[in-house]
Image (spheres, helix red, strand yellow):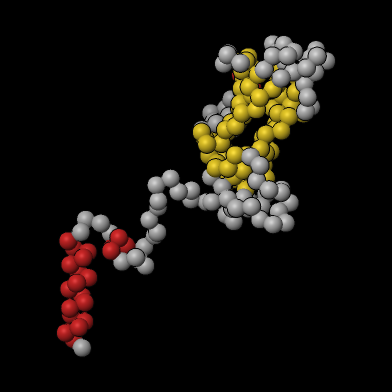
């Protein structure tokens, strides 16, 4: 009995002392699970009976990002501005926290077909240097609204509206717009 115990102890000591890795590398049930390259820590899954419906937007960090415009069709010159709304839906079972360096949490960028910047929503917004954060609880959503001017838009030309969460490159989506007369 003592011989077996001593042998197992020496083997365990040999594995941990001779390796530069943690014991969890050698013993699969000890320690955290190893992360795969490109794995998402909080995978989002669509649930049946979810009040937000199926996943239709960009998903990153366990959050689904949807962008909606109001009005749906932009008619120039009657429409002087339109409202863009980012909706972040937590599709995980844990709260998701987004941290920001200043008061800029989200942004809208309107560009023409050549990539020329027409309007950037944060250009007209005051910025404070206090860190900010947003917590989205499981099964809940958070909305961010901005008003974008149509002053430089011409009917019939195509434009790209880029909506993003500042500091989170994966939480970005684009919408193609073509104003009508």
Q: Is residue 177 left or right of residue 2?
A: right
Q: Residue at x 18, y 86 (%)?
A: 2
Q: How many marks?
A: 0
Q: Residue at x 16, y 84 (%)?
A: 3
Q: In terms of depth relative to the viewer, which is nearer, 2 or 70?
A: 70
Question: Is residue 125 at least partly visible in the picture?
Answer: no
Rendered location of residue 86, percent (x, y): 67, 35
Q: Is residue 91 above or below residue 17?
A: above
Question: Is residue 74 at least partly visible in the picture?
Answer: yes
Rendered location of residue 47, percent (x, y): 66, 56
Where the C terminus falls, by quadrant?
Answer: top right
Rendered location of residue 68, percent (x, y): 71, 33
Asked where in the image residue 58 lies, by quadrant, the reply is top right
Q: Residue at x 40, y 59 (%)?
A: 33
Q: Is residue 171 left or right of residue 7?
A: right
Rendered location of residue 75, percent (x, y): 80, 18
Q: Is residue 151 left or right of residue 88?
A: right
Q: Is residue 143 above or below residue 33?
A: above
Where the N terminus falls, by quadrant?
Answer: bottom left
């Amino acid at each position: 009995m003592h011989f077996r115990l001593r042998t197992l102890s020496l083997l365990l000591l040999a594995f941990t002392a001779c390796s530069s890795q943690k014991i969890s590398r050698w013993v699969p049930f000890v320690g955290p699970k190893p992360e795969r390259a490109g794995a998402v820590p909080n995978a989002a899954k669509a649930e049946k009976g979810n009040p937000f419906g199926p996943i239709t937007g960009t998903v990153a960090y366990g959050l689904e990002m949807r962008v909606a415009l109001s009005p749906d069709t932009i008619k120039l010159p009657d429409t002087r501005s339109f409202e863009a709304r980012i909706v972040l839906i937590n599709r995980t079972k844990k709260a998701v926290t987004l941290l920001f360096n200043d008061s800029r949490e989200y942004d809208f960028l309107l560009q023409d077909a050549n990539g020329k910047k027409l309007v950037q929503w944060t250009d007209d917004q005051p910025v404070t240097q206090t860190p900010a954060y947003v917590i989205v609880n499981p099964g809940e959503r958070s909305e961010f609204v901005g008003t974008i001017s149509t002053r430089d838009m011409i009917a019939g030309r195509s434009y790209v509206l880029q909506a993003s969460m500042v500091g989170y490159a994966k939480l970005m989506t684009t919408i193609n717009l073509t104003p009508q007369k």
